[in-house]
Image: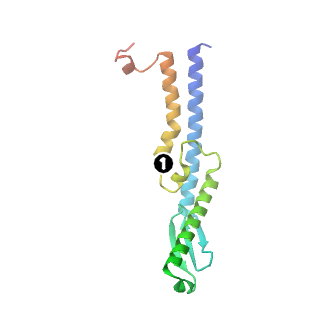
Amino acid sequence: MSETNRSDGNAFQDLDAAMAALEEEQRKLAEISQVRQNETTTVQAKDRSLEMIFDGGGELAELKFNGTKYRNMAPAQLAHVIVETLQQGRAQSMAKMTDLMGSDVLPGIDLAGLATGKVDPSSVIDALISPMLNGVLDDDERRGTGSASDKGGQHG
């Protein structure tokens, strides 16, 4: 097998691996989307004075005050209970997402940000595809088979 054919084979293997990784991430994104739409997390304050329900993306969907205990709290104390419970609920929602995403998180890809809607899904796809494209372009340059524009616009 010539050096050119060996490089082409590696490029195709790299492309296949990148496409497989992309398909796996798309599957995970579909699962995450389902969780965001259908799952909820309910959290009670430590003193049980209130509870919060979070949607699948970790956003507060509902706040319920239990009994009248909250009425006797100082404003700063009530604010602390609300903030503490909110943080606890978001953390639990994020833990659900992290479990769903698995421990094989890809370097440079913020899947938690993706799960909470803070990262654009196209940036994840770019992060997956860019290394593969760069590898193919590098192989072309090593072989001297860059595009016609790389050769001053000459053909052949």
Q: Name the residue under label 1.
A: 121
Q: Which residue is drawn at 59% across and 23% down?
A: 9
Quadrant containing the C terminus is top left
Residue nearer the viewer, 47 or 20: 47
Three-letter amino acid code of the residue under disc 1: Pro
Q: Residue at x 61, y 79 (%)?
A: 48
Quadrant containing the N terminus is top right
> What x and y, as percent, mark residue 149?
36, 21
Neighbourhood count class around disc 1 (C-alpha, 10 Å): few under 14, some 14–19, many 20 upward: some
- Locate residue 146: give its quadrant: top left
Say if 125 sits above or below 69 in the image: above
Residue nearer the viewer, 90 or 5: 90
Tell me the colour scheme of the image.
rainbow
Say if 149 sits above or below 129 in the image: above
> What x and y, as percent, mark residue 128?
53, 39
Q: In this view, does 79 lie to the left or right of 149?
A: right
> What x and y, as percent, mark residue 7?
57, 20
Determine the secondary structure under disc 1.
Answer: helix
